[in-house]
Image (cartoon, rainbow, N blue to C red):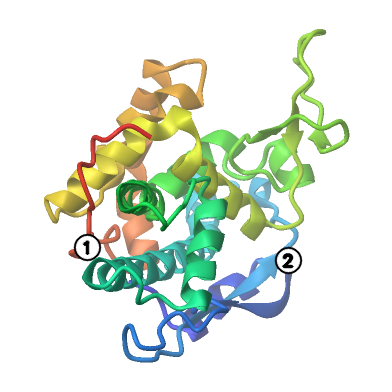
Amino acid sequence: MLRSLVIVLGILAVAAALVAPNALHLANPYRLYDGVVPARNIAVAAPTVTELPNFASHQQTADKKQAFFEFLAPLVEAENALILEQRSGLEALYTKWRLKPDSLSHEQISWLEYLAKRYRVEFNLAEQAEAEQAFALLMRRVDVVPETLVLVQAANESAWGTSRFATEALNLFGQWCFTEGCGLIPGARGDEANHEVQKFASINASIRSYLRNLNTHPAYFELRQLRAQQRDRKNRIRALDLTPGLLSYSERGEAYVEELNAMIRVNRPIILETMGADDPVAEPGFAPNSSSAPE
């Protein structure tokens, strides 16, 4: 699914906002694959983007859309690639643990603990039942979000990369923070509210935070459940299959989801042409316990 590095860098070079490429090393720092699967040198290079192009300069809507998708798609692909590699490692270690619970090395356990912390899962290998539940929860959370959905939601939340929060805070997904000075104060914020629209150091960080939000926040349990069900059935994970899990993303609820669905249907051909591929395909993978288990 991923483009070659040459294509990725070529597309992003026109954005006029790139610093030197910074490799996202997908193999974990604890030599995860030793004795689990054959060693691989897996990395996706993605430039760190610290400024948005001027999408408002495009006179034609079609040109603006094309520029937005071409700019953002490689960054989204890189973040999803990192998640897929984490998932691959998780599956490998789960298999090894099931065959022989005491076979994991200290480094492999440390990596699992790191992954559990990142995805907000309590992890304890000492008790088999608790460990099974933790693995099941991690398998539901450590997973991709279809690029089509990410791109369309970014377009919706950022007014195609032209909103104040997008251009000044590099926040493409309307994410909030609650520490004074952590972001920009919304003009329409009520007197009793204390949230700000989070400011990010890069577009990459904005995408990473958004994906982690969908993969961990209780409000998006249904999205994760729908995704797990698609994996159980070995179906393609499609954007339209997951939008019902975004009811809590906006106060508009159903109307927001319907708007996203309409945007997906209209813009999906442009996105697929831009990316040169379909939405990510669910690889056959493990789904310990039931995908409907509570989190």
Q: Nearer the viewer, residue 231 or 272?
A: 231
Q: Inspect the image, locate mark 2, and give the three-letter code of the amino acid beneath it.
A: Ala
Q: Position of residue 169 (x, y in %)?
A: 76, 44
Tell me the quadrant of the picture where the C terminus can be found. Answer: top left
Q: CA distance from mark 1 to mark 2?
A: 38 Å
Q: Nearer the viewer, residue 139 or 21?
A: 139
Q: Inspect the image, locate mark 1, and give the three-letter code of the amino acid beneath it.
A: Gly
Question: Is residue 265 in sight in this rendering?
Answer: no
Q: Residue furthest top?
A: 191
Sequence-wise, the earlier of marks 1 and 2 is 2
Q: Please identify, in this view, whether the residue under mark 1 or under mark 2 is nearer the observer.
A: 1
Is 140 placed above or below 259 here?
A: below
Q: Nearer the viewer, residue 197 or 209?
A: 209
Is 294 placed above or below 277 here?
A: above
Quarter of the image holding residue 88? bottom left
Quarter of the image holding residue 100? bottom left
Name the residue at 54% across, 50% down.
64
Where disc 1 sits, the SS reads: loop
Q: Position of residue 8 (x, y in %)?
A: 51, 76
Residue identifier under label 2: 17
Tell me the quadrant of the picture where the N terminus can be found. Answer: bottom left
Is 73 placed left or right of 139 in the picture?
right
Is 153 placed above or below 278 here?
A: above
Q: Residue furthest left?
A: 233
Question: Is residue 69 in sight in this rendering?
Answer: yes
Residue identifier under label 1: 285
- The label shown at residue 16 is none
